[in-house]
Image (cartoon, rainbow, N blue to C red):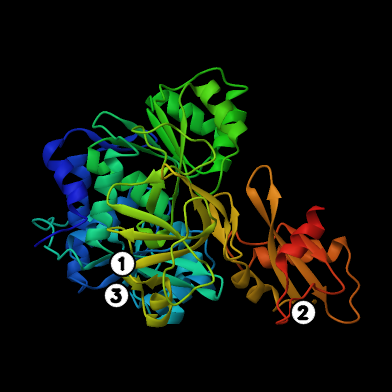
Amino acid sequence: MALSLATVLADSALRRPDHPALVLGDERTSYRDLWAGARRYAAVLREHGIGPGDRVALLIPNSRHFPLAYFGVLALGAVVVPVDALLRAEEVAHVLRDAQPAALICAAALLAEGGPAAGEVGTPVLTVDQERDAGHPRLDALAAGADPIAGAVPREPGDLAVVLYTSGTTGRSKGAMLTHLNLVMNTATTMLSPFDLRPDDVLLGCLPLFHSFGQICGMATCFRAGATLVLMPRFDGPRALDLMVRERCTLVMGVPTMYLALLAAARSDPRRPPLDRAFCGGSALPVAVLEEFRDTFGCPVHEGYGLTEASPVVAYNQRAWPLRPGTVGRPIWGVEVAVAAPAVEDRIEPLPTGEVGEVVVRGHNVMAGYLNRPRASAEAIVDGWLRTGDLGVLDAEGYLTIVDRKKDVVLRGGYNVYPREVEEVLTRHPAVAQVAVVGLPDEVHGQEVCAVVLPQPGISPDRELAAEITAWSRERMGAYKYPRRVEFTEEFPLGPGGKVLKRELVARLTG
């Protein structure tokens, strides 16, 4: 049985060739041209020796080159490895070293980080959007004169389509292996519900395409429906509102910080787009904000829940059932959700309705495992259930509420920030003897990253040192990861096993 995620674009190009697939600034790209362009990219990649099963990394921000490269790689039967465009060179090198891609397709604007990383690992580089010679083949320039491949190379449902990197609290990021079946099913299912995407819908694409929310929930479902994606290179509240009005956007997907920014923009701009529905993920949106958005824009915000390892959607508030603010709704079609005893690790022990436990997921959306990590895969998928590491509760009608994080993940502006990863960087600072990273409540970002530092002996902590640590860390990690707040301590609260009690730290800092 042949099944390919590439058909998401190919089928709409056949059904709606002249309809705009992508809008970026003044440029409009039809489905016919986008699919032909992707097949031209595929032709060039094939000439560079890339074929079915090979992995190809993409370090590309929101631009037309992302879908062209993404679907071009898929059309070849190769595996896409999207790389977070906010990562620093050392972090990019880790992904390349772990995934061992046959090539890195890197946007010119990101060569400062991607180039050294690829050089360190020995990964061949092809560039896009490069005006001057940087010593690498220019994929988009070569594709302009190439003959497109005839069509997508057939793949099996269980073949890998995408490897998406997601960090864990144990340190380095892990590659979640997502199959064509995972992603075709998640795309087709969520297109129908919760997103209810129709051919004449216009979606504001303000989420980063390298992230699963923007890539699958946004780009893939939009293309599957034959709708139009209005892409923003970088989100900004006033520009987003203006773009939604000008392009007559009917739906928007975003994280809480984006909704707060849209509400702020609406207070000084009376224009309103013809929004019919809005979807929020990443972290919880306060009910007061949900109500203000509904009153301001005339449409409800549907909250949902997912994770990269689940391709990514697990549950959502959906039109078929009453909207329940404060919950993430009910599981999507074909997916089961249960709540299990969090302390029982070797098996899934379901808990009764109404009890808090670890959210576990079973269905077509569960990943094939983590690349190169059989032990981590076995720990994550137990008895066919994916252990999410999140704590939640199910009510009698099947609505899921996310209560807390089992792990110490900080959710800043919809991005997962993993304390251990940040701590590993901060411990290299000469003034830091020990550090614990926690998330503190923040009105704008949901949570803010805070580093609690025990200084080296003989060092007196002050505001200047705190600012210096922040500036130092900013140069060494992604823009959403580094601590905006640095606090100092003379000792950490420790548990019986010698672990830092982070909840006590948070209580101390917020009390």
Residue at (79%, 61%) from the top-left corner?
467
Q: Is residue 341 left or right of residue 337?
A: right
Task: Report the front residue among 344 and 1.
Answer: 344
Q: Is residue 99 left or right of residue 19?
A: right
Residue at (68%, 67%) from the top-left corner?
473
Q: Find disc 1 in the rendering and name its residue.
A: 137
Spatial separation of the CA atoms under disc 1 and disc 2? 41 Å
What is the quadrant of residue 381 in the picture? bottom left
Query: Residue 281 at what x, y percent from top left?
Result: 48, 46
- Amino acid carrying label 2: it is Pro
Q: Nearer the viewer, mark 1 or mark 2?
A: 2
Report if the CB atoms under discs 3 and 1 are less than 8 Å apart: no
Crowd rating for badge 1 (residues with CA inside 10 Å; few <14, some 14–19, many 20+): some
What is the quadrant of residue 3 in the picture? bottom left
SS label for mark 1: loop
Q: Is residue 508 left or right of residue 187?
A: right
Q: Is residue 296 above or below residue 118?
A: above
Q: Is residue 274 left or right of residue 390?
A: left
SS label for mark 3: loop
Q: Which mark is residue 173?
A: none
Query: Residue 52 at what x, y percent from top left?
Result: 18, 70
Q: Which mark is residue 102?
A: 3
Q: Residue furthest front?
A: 352
Query: Residue 51 at what x, y percent from top left?
Result: 18, 71
Task: Report the front residue among 211 and 50.
Answer: 211
Task: Report the front residue among 82 and 130.
Answer: 82
Crowd rating for badge 2 (residues with CA inside 10 Å; few <14, some 14–19, many 20+): few
Image quarter (top left, top right, bottom left or bottom right) of the N terminus: bottom left
